[in-house]
Image (cartoon, grey):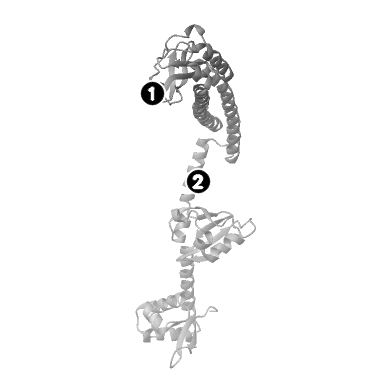
Amino acid sequence: MASKMTLRVQLLVLQALIVFLVTLATGIVAGAFQEQALREAYKDRMQAVAQSVAALPTVLDAFDDAEPSTTIQPIAEVIREASDLAYVVVADEDGIRYSHPNPERIGEKVSTDPSIPLSGEVYVGTQTGTLGTSWRVKVPIRDDDGTVIGTASVGILESELNEEFTANLVWLISAMLAAAVFGVFGSAWVTSIIRRRIYGLEPHQIAALVKNQETTLHGLSEGVVTVDGTGRITLVNDAAARFLGRDAADLDGAPAAEVLGEELTTVLREGEAAGRPVIVGSHVLVARSTGSDADGGGIGATLLLRDHTELHDVVRRVEAADAIIAFRQRFGVPKGLSAETLDRVVAALAARPDASATEIGEDLDISRVSARRYLEHLASAGRAIRTLDYTTKGRPSTRYRLNGAV
């Protein structure tokens, strides 16, 4: 229906959706890794700065001064500005600040819990202080004996961290959009290739073709076998599978030379437009083929098989009947012989050329002597030819065959 999307549009939409979802998922993961990497980079920088401040001899000596902030504040500000951090705060063991970006906060107690660095451990995390919420590192300050005498805290505001992440995210989003655009164009290109390979058909047209092909192929009394250039069967209908004595499902993809046999493979490869009689099992088939166009030993052709078994049997029966009628017209039946039995003997001899009296007797369920009388009559009348078989042990045996010249 016209209201339905065409295959081209469906393929393009589906592929574009896949590209969008994959790009979005990749962007989310990349953004998460980007933020984590940014935080880790700042953590390493802040930890290095905090430990450097805590180990400065000038800072340690200033703790014994009457006004430690006079010495520590200028040093902390220089380090803060050089490190591009929001603050560098030094405090004593009671939490009293000796440095702060806002000099008015010096001498006040720190606004966050200093218990972790005062216990000798390093703290890394997000806390809200006088400047706002920040990503910070706190380290203990130890004297020459290793006793904790204060803390050094450095950090960067979460707002500044988010601004830097957002700036990096712009490049990430730009790369994602470029990838999505290229993906859509690639999807359109792939769609056009697929459309060309299916001859521009829509799904309902393809389904109708497949249905018609299945109905036609499997409804044919003539066998159809298609072989690709590598010599493997790509299509076989029910009639062909029945002639070959195999299941159609087992033949798909099978090597043609193994399945078809030498005679049919020769017909398939060489081509036979008029048809060539081939005996396959109990079937008398007439095989036709388009022949191979491939070089280098490939096949790539279609084989058509028509069953002539019944026609062959009819022809044989007609030939036998004609022979009987012709014989009756030329010769009478001697006394002691039955015309009906003579007809049966002629038919049996036509079916079994070069037979002995014993074999004819077994075929007709009559005695060897009776069969011999009928065969000798046929031979004397010129209807049959008598020959001696010297390959038997002892006396040579007598064999008979119909005389085709009569």
At a point 59% along the width and 32% down the height, the residue shown is 188
Which residue bears the numbered disc 1? 119
Residue 149 locus on image (x, y percent): 43, 20
Residue 70 locus on image (x, y percent): 52, 11
Total residue callouts: 2
Q: Is residue 231 left or right of residue 215?
A: right
Q: Is residue 345 above or below residue 209?
A: below
Give residue 29's mark. none
Instruction: Rate crowding at label 1 as few (under 14), some (14 to 19) or many (20 or more) other CA atoms within 10 Å.
Output: few
- Kindly identify the amino acid type of the residue bearing the numbered disc 1: Ser
Instruction: Rate crowding at label 2 as few (under 14), some (14 to 19) or many (20 or more) other CA atoms within 10 Å.
Output: few
Q: Nearer the viewer, residue 36 or 271?
A: 36
Q: Is residue 24 above or below residue 300?
A: above
At a point 51% along the width and 62% down the height, the residue shown is 260
Query: From mark 2 to mark 1, how far is it between C-alphas?
Result: 84 Å
Which tag is nearer the camera, tag 2 or tag 1? 1
- Kindly identify the amino acid type of the residue bearing the numbered disc 2: Gln
Residue 114 locus on image (x, y percent): 40, 18
Which residue bears the numbered disc 2? 213
